[in-house]
Image (cartoon, rainbow, N blue to C red):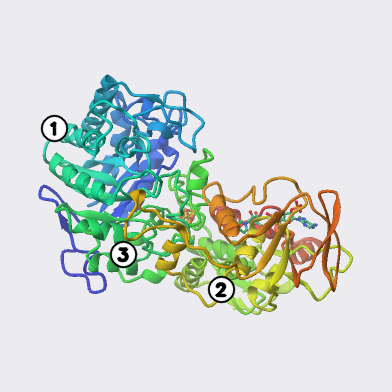
Amino acid sequence: MSETHELYPHLFEPLDLGFTTLQNRILMGSMHTGLEEEGNGFKKLARYYRERADGEVGLIVTGGVAPNRAGWVFPFSSRLARKSQVAKHRIVTDLVHETETKICLQILHAGRYGYHPFCVAPSAIRAPINRFRPKALSNRGVQTTIDDFARCAELAREAGYDGVEIMGSEGYLINQFIAEKTNRRTDRWGGSFANRSRFPIEVVRAVRARVGDEFIIIFRLSMLDLVKGGSQWSEVVALAQEIEKAGATIINTGIGWHEARIPTIATLVPRASFTWVTALLKKEVNLPLVATNRINMPEEAEQTLAEGCSDMVSMARPFLADPHWVRKARMGEERGINTCIGCNQACLDHIFSKQTASCLVNPRACRELEAPLVKAEAHKTIAVVGGGPAGLACSCAAAERGHRVTLYEQSEDIGGQFLLAAKIPGKEEFTETLRYFRQQLENLKVNVRLQSTPTVEKLAAYDEIVVATGVRPRDLTLAGSDHDKVISYQELISGQKTAGRRVAVIGSGGIGFDVAAFLLHDPASKPDRDRFMAQWGIDRSYGNAGGICAAAESEPLREVFLLQRKTTKPGANLGKTTGWIHRSVLKKNRVKFLIGVRYLSIDDGGLTIEHEGETKKLEVDNIVVCAGQESQTALAADLEAAEINYHLIGGARKATEVDAKRAIYEAFELADRL
Ligand code: NAP
Ligand code: SF4
């Protein structure tokens, strides 16, 4: 493996750290899974990491582990503070060390982000995203905390880890000491920059002193806080240099505090948008640097290294999506990579709602032990009807188990709702999922029949029938709903029909939001890093503290009204970690949200509604209907009538709140049972 790799020479160059060597330049970034706190969770965690190690990742960083109780992210979250807690970590390190992969434990002290009453911080200033006010640490408390970091690192070494990552970014405790915004102390831990940076430097020194020379210490440094009162660039550089002197082995990049209102990892962030920050620091320090954020395919990863932005690249979510990302890149099988689409729906949204993390495009993630997808004992013939996300996922998983699968799709292409989703600005990554499925169908020799609607008699010949016929948009029952002005979301997004300058969108669920974003987006523009920075107020010249500036404003492309009958907040069901971004995009484009609306009629003049006790006419050119969906069940009914057994999955089974996550999960579950 030490020979130069033809396609990705930088990515596959080993990294010599002096006392140990990493087999390649790819770091699996820290990601809490929820298994850490589950009873028997470490066995599952070990299998989860082992699969990524089998996939040849160079270095794994575990999810964050608190060094003491005050450092918990939430009550009873994972902590390593006592000898008795070492054994369970051994299960992980032993299994990973049967491979060449190295593994570091992340030490994370949440500080004022701790969602519990014991949280502490440099100063007693409540975080805008937490209802708990932290207690200010005393001088003695600061010293004890430093000691707890060192003790945690010592225990990590005992547990067999190759090193630790000290979490110094994302707005957690260490970051809170560094930034003036959160540190109002007047003792030796606050005030001047030298005082504010004392805490991280002392932590690194203490850890190095406790673990000896031959142990990796990664420091995750916030290089761009993206909050008011964050660090100046000169402070980032000075701190990095001190961290190097204090004994760190590697510096990893942190971008944006959790409370920042600038997207840093969502799909709408163009790929590799933040590598420039790491590149700036590259000139200032000597130790290896790691670039992060929205690097999800080998091309960007290689380019980041080739351009000299960093010495390693970090990816976290891409390893949930595909544990074998690295091996596939090495073998030149990039088309077979199941790409992370940055949706957050099954990873971060799960974590923030106290569910175990998984992945929308890979429901096996974090379930490796329970759902190994073993070869079927009897190989059956299976017909899957419907080539949307559910049908595709079921076909591939069933074929992987050794069944002979035929996939019927009535249109001329596979993809279903994914084909529409991929046309929404900021969701272009869905095309990667379709590329992956196409490759899988080919690799697994699934017989794909496009423009084909099988008869009940034909289906009866198969051992198993899976009906994944999806959904159709719900029609409006309203006076004038057949008016020319009325467009369904499918007609609009697929390009069958276009909308005028003033548009009313009926329904403000996920699709209503997507449609509004679609209407406000210039179809000629492609994802562009500079435009993204300008739109969200990220200052590449780093003139201000935190790297922020005023966001650029532009005239919206259309005047859009987004309507709903309920009086709840529009988009209340959008993802926990991405909903604010969708709302923010629409607000920037001056979308008018109307709630508690009653629809009365549609005519040449527009849409008449009752709103806030008045009858109003919205003089719009078009009305786009995003009023949810109904299941397409005709085939299921025919099979029922013929008394033929079948399995119903995805939107065809239940249209309410169906999304790709549920559709793919159901498909996978079924394929595992067939
Ligand atoms: P949805 O979230 O259920 O929203 C349907 C909307 O239509 C609601 O705003 C509802 O509000 C309205 N509505 C329902 N029946 C109506 C009727 N008869 N007449 C007029 N309005 C009616 O469904 P969706 O937007 O179609 O999305 C489908 C699924 O995909 C959802 O699970 C959604 O979460 C998911 N999705 C998520 C995202 C995302 O997170 N970014 C994006 C796309 C899709 P009122 O009843 O109050 O009027
Ligand atoms: Fe990526 Fe979405 Fe999977 Fe999370 S759920 S790992 S963001 S594809």
Classify mark 2 as within 8 Å of ligand 1 or not, answering yes or no: no
Q: Is residue 124 shown above or below 647?
A: above
* Label 1 CB-ligand 2 distance < 8 A: no
Mark 2 near mark 3, Cβ–Cβ under 8 Å?
A: no
Return the residue nearer the eye: 423 or 653. 423
Query: Looking at the picture, which amino acid does disc 1 mark?
Result: Ala
Residue nearest the viewer, comparing 67 with 97: 67
Q: Which amino acid does label 3 sit on?
A: Ala
How far apart are the alpha carbons under marks 1 and 2? Answer: 56 Å
C-alpha separation, residue under disc 2 versus residue under disc 3: 29 Å
Which element type, helix, strand or loop, lies under badge 2?
loop
Q: Which mark is residue 301?
A: 3
User: Which residue is label 1 attached to?
Assistant: 209
82 left or right, relative to 360:
left
Q: Are marks 3 and 1 in contact (CB under 8 Å)?
A: no
Q: Counting other residues with Cα less than 10 Å from the Cα at mark 1, is it few (<14), some (14-19), or many (20 or more)? A: some
Residue at point 20% right, 46% down? 238
Relative height, residue 347 to residue 183 (above, below) = below
User: Which image quarter is the C terminus in?
Assistant: bottom right
Residue assigned mark 2: 522
